[in-house]
Image (cartoon, coloured by chain):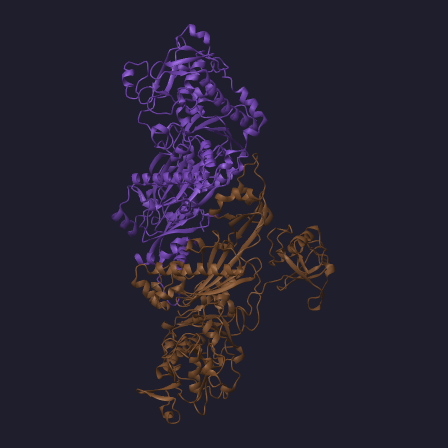
Chain colours: A purple, B brown
Amino acid sequence: MTSPTDPLVLFMPSGKRGRFPVGTPILDAARQLGVYVESVCGGRATCGRCQIEVQEGNFAKHKIVSSLDHISPKGPKEERYERVRGLPEGRRLSCSATVQGDLVVDVPQDTVINAQTIRKAASDRVIERNPAIQMCYVEVDEPDMHKPLGDLDRLKAVLAKDWGWKDLRVAQHIIPDVQKILRKENWAVTAAIHKDMEFSRPTMVALYPGLKNEAYGVACDIGSTTIAMHLVSLLSGRIVASAGAPNPQIRFGEDVMSRVSYVMMNPDGREAMTAAVRQAVNDLIGKVCAEGGVDRRDIFDSVFVCNPIMHHLFLGIDPTELGQAPFALAVSGAVQGWTHDIGIDVNRGARFYLLPCIAGHVGADAAGATLSEGPYRQDKMMLLVDVGTNAEIVLGNAKHVVAASSPTGPAFEGAEISSGQRAAPGAIERVRIDPETFEPKYRVIGVDKWSDEEGFEDAAQATGVTGICGSAIIEVVAEMYLTGLISEDGVVDGALSARTPRIIENGRTFSYLLRDGQPRITVTQNDIRAIQLAKAALYAGTKLLMEKQGIETVDTIRFAGAFGSFIDPKYAMVLGLIPDCELSEVKAVGNAAGTGALMALLNRDHRREIEREVARIEKVETALEPDFQRLFINAMALPNKVDAFPKLSEQVMLPPRKAAEGGEGEGGGRRRGREGRRRG
Amino acid sequence: MTSPTDPLVLFMPSGKRGRFPVGTPILDAARQLGVYVESVCGGRATCGRCQIEVQEGNFAKHKIVSSLDHISPKGPKEERYERVRGLPEGRRLSCSATVQGDLVVDVPQDTVINAQTIRKAASDRVIERNPAIQMCYVEVDEPDMHKPLGDLDRLKAVLAKDWGWKDLRVAQHIIPDVQKILRKENWAVTAAIHKDMEFSRPTMVALYPGLKNEAYGVACDIGSTTIAMHLVSLLSGRIVASAGAPNPQIRFGEDVMSRVSYVMMNPDGREAMTAAVRQAVNDLIGKVCAEGGVDRRDIFDSVFVCNPIMHHLFLGIDPTELGQAPFALAVSGAVQGWTHDIGIDVNRGARFYLLPCIAGHVGADAAGATLSEGPYRQDKMMLLVDVGTNAEIVLGNAKHVVAASSPTGPAFEGAEISSGQRAAPGAIERVRIDPETFEPKYRVIGVDKWSDEEGFEDAAQATGVTGICGSAIIEVVAEMYLTGLISEDGVVDGALSARTPRIIENGRTFSYLLRDGQPRITVTQNDIRAIQLAKAALYAGTKLLMEKQGIETVDTIRFAGAFGSFIDPKYAMVLGLIPDCELSEVKAVGNAAGTGALMALLNRDHRREIEREVARIEKVETALEPDFQRLFINAMALPNKVDAFPKLSEQVMLPPRKAAEGGEGEGGGRRRGREGRRRG
């Protein structure tokens, strides 16, 4: 029982506060308030995981004066730890340090969502940790013939007594080794408890002799094109390593639909693709572990996001149903299980968690992005788009969220464009057109200079200038529109061929010559039509959701995925990819799906959160909406944004990418990094 | 809501009763009262599993007049079932038949514990079924693009709606096949729900297109010598087949201790023995399935009992710790898991349940026997003994139960006896000695006549007379004592060699010549000592437990195991194997351990029951009890029972066994059947 005169303790960053009697260990105070502070050794001052810092000062806002005098001095156990393992300046072990007066206690969080993870993020965010894995050190009673409880049963008894684990399940694979492990370090062991098995039933998934003071997890986004992974310490939240790799399923088909076809045509197709993606995930785990100096057997938990077809193939489910109406998912809810059962080679007791799918075309990746950006966590009306072969579109706020996918096709990724190519050295990535002369200038990936700068051609010798990638296609079409080279309905103005040799007759239509060389790079009428179709699909899908919400404008826009990271939001708005919005409220959020996976890995409350929210989301199937066709046709025209951006070409331009820069948060080869996280 | 004027319905054999409004389906009435009536189709009158019978008459004791007029006439669905599948005279489908007036309803139970299972059982018992497996037929909504729930998610929704399964877990191996199964019979499927996973969390373990109206289980007693198995229909309780087979681990060591030694001496010993016993169990499953015409993939549940060392080896646990003090079990509590994980090849979703062990020497088999005989279910003080190399002894009543094991050694099984042999054709099984002439007569397994009957030698030509088996060793020593050939302290009276040539000098001691032939069969002083030691161990263990209970006599005695089935309780009492008790209260209960397994298979409430009771049992370690040595020495002497049984030889003798008769409830070859279920 606490009294109103007991010292007040405020924990940061959670802001949780409470009064505790003098002498309360700070770890206990945190536990009582539901503040997650790690502890493996259970208060023996040996693991060092429960470190905190005391802030000194007068926190008038919180009506609390915190002082280092308000925490107990270091006792012998804490001093021993400091002597043996070292304790950073200002850090204390919260299991040993007790409350002596009012305190503001800082629980250090390894920042997780930071600039390394999300480029251009408005601000770094902190994920408060509450991982599914807890490492629990105990000292087990020795066997007693008078009370012949089994070794495992006595272990369970002490885990109940010391850590409060009642009704603990024990993974079957541990049982044969229990006796040897218990005897190895004189009946001291550390049990890895997984708290997020089905229905949060705690389960012992691994057992180690003595103190085991490490536990890792991986968060993985399995894209159609690229697989991206973070390796994280579950005990500190630190991202130990991140890496990406191409999805080897590409050899079975470039996009997800061609992979579904492959399954339909080949009796062993599903099996081969499942094996390929699992092998790739295993290889990538090897890569992040090597980079982080971590033993893969110390990985106990994993979270995956992916689009529905990757989801099915990864789980070993035939995706054929997803290739045809009614696009029935085998399972839409979150899936969890033993990594062992899906051929992922980490700790034998490791678990996996796959975020729920929203609908047949709106997968666990969209759920991950939704978790990361959290439209439902705020009042602003947020539009969240992730563009691939389909655009996944989520629109909503705390009141209501709607979601749909729209068939943009691959034009935004440079496919089906005459000079289109993937983002790779040699690809044009930025374009500007002079409104008077219609002369273009451009930048090329891997080349430092603009094309009109001195020495460009020399600098471009190494890479060549080989095509246009996705972001430049948006820009060149937008610039052609802004300069009047094309009309509102997207027709290249052939009359201008009189004013510039860059307008070239091409059968019954006209093209724009961007670069005359080897190869010759042009923007054809067909290219413009393909972009128009793609943008119309995206805009119509967005507009449909806006109509569902009964709104005319959105408050804030998030572009997820690699495509979103590299296009210039201004041009996206010029072309009408996205609805009107304050430019400052348009943000690229990188691999938001992967960030969602990371959040679900580090805090299992986020799993319940996204399961709950996905169930609440209103799913809209564009193919069934009579309005979609109307909206789509209306969206074909290029909007009249000229007045809104009179001097667009003069505005500060986005900095060019560095040649060596990898795909967004994917660490993968540049070649595919920019292609988009996935195409399905 | 029911009213006091609603019809009264009494269910038999449970005796549960309640009032229900006119029109209530009888199945619903049963469910509301907690009476287990099977139903697979969920009230569609297609599975036929919910059959009941109405008893007619005035059941004055229950104040109820039951009449066939008080049940609704057959409706169209029930008539269709009768036409298509047939309905036995008097049977009704309780899902269709409704309450129209007072009723006595008989829920047919396939008798389970009957003469076939337990020989000499006082009376057949009925196990009320409540199996862990429930088959649930449902018709699933087709996919709907407007509500894009996954196929599995819609299946779960209808299982919740129709059958009340909330928070249903789904075994991971089902997921890849869900879509094909759902579509095979037009969205009608039967789910196998296992209700006894850890903490009774319901789990879908298998899924079938259409109506799947069968589910089986196996109850198995893994003895050191013999493995015995019942195959049971979980939907009716019918024992479909029973069989036994030798435990192939015998090739690694005759008794359990030699098998522990084998593990200690051979690096791959544990693995080899685990593989051997699992293979034997798989083979035996094949045998019972072939006999019962059952597909092994229709087996969904299994229950095992075994002694601690078999328990460990079966689970893949090194049993070395059990070979030395403090005899620490790796796990003493009940163990459950997927049969797949222990290499038992039945349905992929099948589970196993292993009864708890009581102590390091008192295993899950003793727990099974305790469950079967239920000392804790009654007020009488019951002694339950199961004799092997160790005797497992349980003593108690509803108030308190104590248990111990006592090192009897293998003498009772014919080992370490000069002319001892296993129970097999040619073995002497009954012995009587004339108190005047000291001439013996005996019976031999496989021979119809007593040795003093005309034509015995001719009849014995086929088998020969090869040795003495366990039951006859007891009898011959008891008869020698009753006729004065040996004294109370077990010494053969050499002086009698003057009166009979059958007393033969043998070094410094004397032997009794039972049969002069090839081979020569004698009872030596050493043989008598071995029996004395064994009986002293058994009696001292029993006496120790009686002292723990503070009692001088027991009310009732149960001999479990094969040894107990074949010895004559009178001789057991003469020799002082067991304490004083009314002879009519001494019963052989055959393979009570196996019966316990069967009970736990057919009714999962029995699992909780035995888990609870095993936790309550006071475990006594004889090696630690200072009194044990004293009791042991006192028990060496043969008790003066001559007055109690003055004309023992003239009493009605037990009927001889038939030559072809198998081991008790084990179905195994006679050769080993009689050797005892196990030796550890």
Residue found at the far left of this picture? A83
Residue found at the far top of this picture? A498
In this rendering, does residue B274 appear at all?
yes
Residue found at the far bottom of this picture? B498
Residue located at (34% from left, 39% from top)? A283
Task: Tell whether B111 sits left or right of A478.
Answer: right
Residue A595 in percent (x, y) is at: 41, 35
Residue A574 in percent (x, y) is at: 46, 18
Residue located at (32% from left, 66% from top)? B261
Which of the two residues, A502 or B87, is positioned nearer the viewer here? B87
Residue B524 in percent (x, y) is at: 36, 83
Residue A259 in percent (x, y) is at: 44, 34
In this rendering, does residue B608 appear at all?
no
- Which picture quadrant has residue B255? bottom left
* Residue B47, above or below A362: below
Which of the two residues, A495 or A394, is positioned nearer the viewer here? A495
Q: How many marks?
A: 0
* Residue B347, above or below B179: below
Which of the two residues, A592 or B318, is positioned nearer the viewer here? B318
Q: In which quadrant will I find the C terminus of chain A?
A: top left
* Residue B224, above or below A83: below
